[in-house]
Amino acid sequence: MADDPIALFDAWYAEAQASEPNDPNAMALATVGADGQPSVRMVLLKGHGADGFVFYTNRESRKAGDLRAAAKAALLFHWKSLRRQVRIEGPVAHASDAESDAYFGTRSRDSQLGAWASDQSRPLADRATFEARFAEMQARFDGRDVPRPPHWGGYRVTPHQIEFWQDRAHRLHERRVFTAGASGWSEGMLYP
């Protein structure tokens, strides 16, 4: 058994990439707004390592507003085919502009254009309005590379706690929890 939660995550994630039928990098992101209201949504993990877990989004979206109000988040990976979950909690900070630019450059052109066309999380009168804005962005950037919008970028969740949950028969699940401290990670177990 690994005593390094990042190495254990890497092993579980590799198994999920081999077995999950769709989006093994999908994770629930939980935030809390300035009003104390929690909110959760699915985002995609786009990078991870000892320094944290990275996802990208519109920095004017509701989730970004929540992260401005309280720069903490919880992540949940649920790999149903493996009967496993990983929970991660910690503070959140912006990924660097260089990281955001590099990732944005790997996205499909339509995804890049969509980042310019969408006022993510804000009311939309009808689908035709969004499609018209998308067509405007196609014309605006015709024949040119699409730069990263100034309001779009990455966030990094630095884990302070990581829990590995493994399904067991009769709901006698195994729960290993790692907590970050000044001298590294400490490990414990939780009752199912």
Image (cartoon, grey):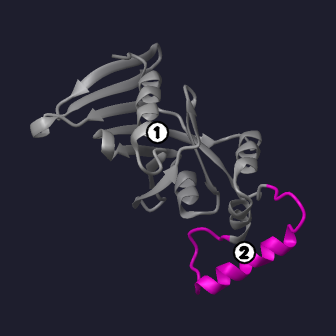
Determine whether, in the image, residue 61 is placed left or right of residue 11: right
- Disc 1 target residue: 17
- Disc 2 target residue: 134
Q: Which of 37/4 is in front?
A: 4
Q: Which of 117/64 is in front?
A: 117
> Is disc 2 surrounded by few (<14), some (14 to 19) or many (20+) residues within 10 Å?
some
Residue 33, numbered label: none
Query: Which numbered disc, 2 or 1, marks the residue closer to the eye?
Result: 1
Q: Is residue 72 above or below residue 36?
A: above
Percent of width and height locating residue 170: 9, 39
Percent of width and height locating residue 85: 33, 40
Determine whether, in the image, residue 175 is placed left or right of residue 100: left
Locate residue 155: give its quadrant.
top right
**Residue 125 within the segment the image draws in magenta:** yes
Q: Which residues are magenta?
A: 118-147
Tell me the residue at 72%/60% (across/down). Answer: 112
Determine whether, in the image, residue 179 is placed left or right of residue 67: left
Percent of width and height locating residue 153: 68, 51
